[in-house]
Amino acid sequence: MKKNVKLQSFITIGMLSSISFLLMLFNFPIPPFPAFLEVDFSDMPALLAAITMGPIAGILVELFKNILDWLFSGTPTGVPVGHMANFATGLLFILPVSYIFNRFKTIVGLVGGLVTGTVVMAVGMSLLNYAVFLPMYTYFLGMEPVVGDSLYTMIVAGILPFNLVKGVLLTAIMVLLFTTMRKWIDNQRAMYLTK
């Protein structure tokens, strides 16, 4: 029985990773934010994996979808800075949701987790873009680094509110999915998370 569940979990993670990869292809900017900031809904399968199978499953879906996208789409710098940023963004969002939902297991717990995940993602990615990703991106593209007031403005007026808006969109979709798929989610949790 345990071997069947383990095999089923590998298959499910693979399927969710494939769906996540496909969703990643349908990205779009949100005016008036900078054009390099694009929304996609590829975190939804990872979030489903995290709340039904545990946080490791969600992490694996985030990892595999970024590896697939890197292999199929490539990167302008030769270094997958954008994919690393996408991976970090996904983890900062799904892990708080998974933790809080697994403690409370209700729609209120889910919404609380989604709100927390949105804030953690927005603040965390602001700090990571400031300290890591924007400097890496400009370095590998051979551009002049963004520093001082320009960097501060890009973070505060662009990246922070963008991730808050993205989190609100993901929250709305996840609440809708949860209310329509509650029975399936409960069945999956019973299969994968029962001790």
Image (cartoon, rainbow, N blue to C red):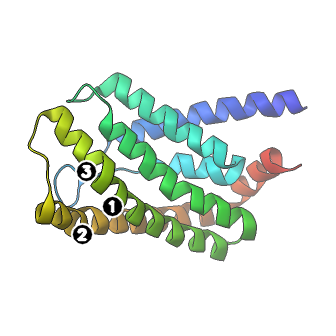
Q: Residue at x 69, y 51 (%)?
A: 52
Vertically, is 115 above or below 193? Answer: below
| Residue 51 falls left or right of residue 152 | right
Q: Please say if 172 is above or below 1.
A: below
Q: Nearer the viewer, residue 147 or 106?
A: 147
Q: CA distance from mark 3 to mark 2?
A: 21 Å
Quadrant in which residue 165 is drawn: bottom left
Question: Which residue is label 3 attached to?
Answer: 28
- The x and y percentages for residue 163 are 34, 63
Secondary structure under the numbered disc 2 in the rendered image: helix
Classify residue 156 as left or right of residue 62.
Answer: left
**Can you say whether 17 is above or below 133 in the image?**
above
Residue that label 2 marks: 156
Per the model, the C-alpha gap separating discs 1 and 2 is 8 Å
Mark 3 element type: strand
Q: Residue furthest left?
A: 144
Tag 3 or tag 1, which sits nearer the N-term?
3
Q: Amino acid at mark 1?
A: Ser
User: Which residue does the image show at 20% across and 33% down from the upper left?
Assistant: 140
Q: Are marks 1 and 2 in contact (CB under 8 Å)?
A: yes
Q: Residue furthest bottom?
A: 108
Amino acid type at mark 3: Phe
Task: Pick whichever of labels 3 and 2 is earlier in the sequence.
Answer: 3
Q: Which residue is at 64% across, 41% downward?
A: 57
The nearer-to-camera label among 1 and 3 is 1
Callout 2 amino acid: Val
